[in-house]
Amino acid sequence: RHRTHNTMRKSTSAIVLTVSALLALEGALGFIPASAFGPSSLMHRGSSAHARKSGALCLRAQEETRQGLPATGLGWEKRPASSLTDSKAPKTRDTDMKISQKGEVKIDGHVLAYDYLPGDGPTIFFLPALNQTRHGTKASALKTWCRRTGRSFFVADYYGVGKSSGDYAEATISRWASDTKQLVKYLSDQHAQDKVILVGAGVGGWVMLHAVQGQEQPLRPVVGCVGVAADPDFTETLVWPALDQATKDKVMKDGIADITWGGKPYTITKALIQDGKKMLLLDKGTSSIEVRCPVRLIQGLGDEEIPSETALKLSDALQAEDVVITYVKYGKHGLEEYEDDFKRIHFAIEDIERSDTKANFFRSLNRPV
């Protein structure tokens, strides 16, 4: 009996020490490694698969609450916060209804119109699809979500589009990418937003990749990219080969032409086609795109404008190791028909934010004292 009592006391002490160690680790890292919930720890051996799943969900709850994010069950469904977190920690972000600021900024002699919503960083910087203004469906929905969750948001009309100055016939991927780089710097200089997450839809995904390539280390103002049906190289590999000769002649002669692509009307220009030849990304082989930040790609399998395998080719060409592709069965090119289409973007952003938080911790370990 005495031996049994000692054994029980030792087992209880071991459990207390294990829980204490987990709490200490969680306090230092902001998360607990999933390996801590392996079959040899507090979970029963016979339910290791369930334990790992439950542990992962628990970790996500801890991170969301610790970072001030709403406890939303992988960003999708409401659920209670983790019991291991500090009870005094904020359960949601500051959701004061802030008003977006409309403004203009002069870059290389032309004026770009933008909307800026103050909030917590990283700033969510949205890059619209071809022929779309800053007030499109995705931009408006994303701004509403950022306002509701206390995030900072930024979107601007491209050169030659919407309220921005310039002739659309002279607009190019090169110019839009250069403008994006300078707008990122503008956010840092004028709004003290040192980190951004770029979200590019369609051609915005192409612009996004060129804007991030070769960004200076270790500053890395762009901490992640989200591509929604990103279509790099589409002018050269898809659109131009599919045009009839009469339309090609009109583009070369007049400099601009209206076409129908994927059942939708678009305006393409000679400048866009010719510049696109110089801005190709997917023709240079594996790990040829100098983008090393986390990347999340969302692609519809029912895309009527670009092949669904474009996301796979892009993933192979990126130097980044942290790349995740989400395929949406029956998803069209726009990916804005259902509420879940927008939730996938939200989850991708939250996932990058978590990756950045972890990366910041491990970088801090290597700093000299």
Image: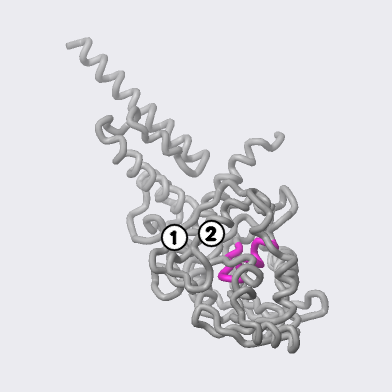
Prevailing secondary structure class for the magenta stretch in the rendered image: helix
**Residue 197 to residue 46: above or below:** below
Amino acid identity at mark 1: Tyr
Q: Does 170 sit above or below residue 307? A: below
- Whichever of callouts 1 and 2 sits on the residue coming sooner in the sequence is 2
The answer to which of 311 and 33 lies nearer the viewer is 311
Q: Residue at x 41, y 34 (%)?
A: 36
Q: State the image quarter where residue 238 is shown.
A: bottom right
Q: Are marks 1 and 2 in contact (CB under 8 Å)?
A: yes
Q: Which residue bears the numbered disc 1?
A: 327
The residues colored magenta run 198-211
Residue assigned mark 2:
311
Give the residue drawn at x 43%, y 59%.
70
| Image: 140 above or below 322 | below
Q: Position of residue 282 (x, y in %)?
A: 64, 58
Classify residue 130 as left or right of residue 219. left
Lateral position of residue 199 relative to residue 78, left or right: right
Q: Residue at x 66, y 36 (%)?
A: 366
